[in-house]
Amino acid sequence: MNHLIPLDNLVAALSRLPGIGRRTAERMALTLVQDQKGLMRVLANALLEADDGMACCERCGNVTLASANPCALCIRPRRDAHILCVVESPGDIMKIEASGGYQGRYHALMGKLSPMHGTGAADLRVDTLLQRISDEGITEVLIALGTDVESDATSSYLSEILATREVDVSRIAFGLPAGSAIEYSDAATLAHAISGRQKIG
């Protein structure tokens, strides 16, 4: 029915968001259409404001204000400019920053190798990474990707490329969550924890 085309377009747009399936998108769209308190306009205005005022940092890929590009993490002088933490997305940068355990700079690949989704090396910010290593005098690259098959493949690919560069390459350790016990851990987590063991003292 032609008069429902705007609703169909809204559902289609919402379903493109990660983690939102068709049925969830339909429920969200109907909620917005039925709302009598102006939520649709509030959401539309927030989206337009973010579209105009937000951007991804031209250097590291982090989310930043369009008026502050490069972002604060890239220009802050107190950060260690010789180590680069490579992550999959800007969300990972936010998570690592919240931990307070890292004080270097970042580089978001904006994805990972995924033949299933048609994502190859050319789709990632690998060339930019190599250029930054050369231009910024990077001495260590810390690969901070997940432990799924695609992340492992991406980490291996990066390690091979970086082996020809004069940089130390490391990967974050994986192991038991804080406050957890061995009896509640799966075999893969335990294997990563053992292989990533560190000396005491």
Image (cartoon, rainbow, N blue to C red):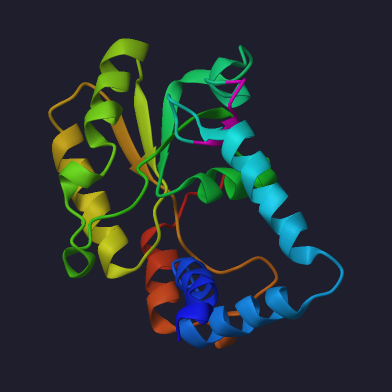
Q: Is residue 181 magenta?
A: no
Seen at 16% across and 64% down, the residue is 115
Q: Nearer the viewer, residue 143 or 121?
A: 121
Q: Position of residue 2 (x, y in %)?
A: 45, 80
Image quadrant in which the C terminus is located: top right
- In screen coordinates, is 201 left or right of 149? right
Q: Which residues are magenta?
A: 62-68
Locate residue 162: give its quadrant: top left
Compared to residue 57, the image places residue 195 above or below, namely below
Q: Is residue 97 visible?
A: no
If the image is split into quadrants, where does the N terminus sit? bottom left
| Residue plotted at (43% across, 24% down) | 59
The front one of 29 and 20 is 29
Residue 56, placed above or below residue 189: above
Residue at point 35%, 42% (across, down): 109
Q: Nearer the viewer, residue 11 or 135?
A: 11
How far from the left and from the top, in percent, is residue 41?
74, 57
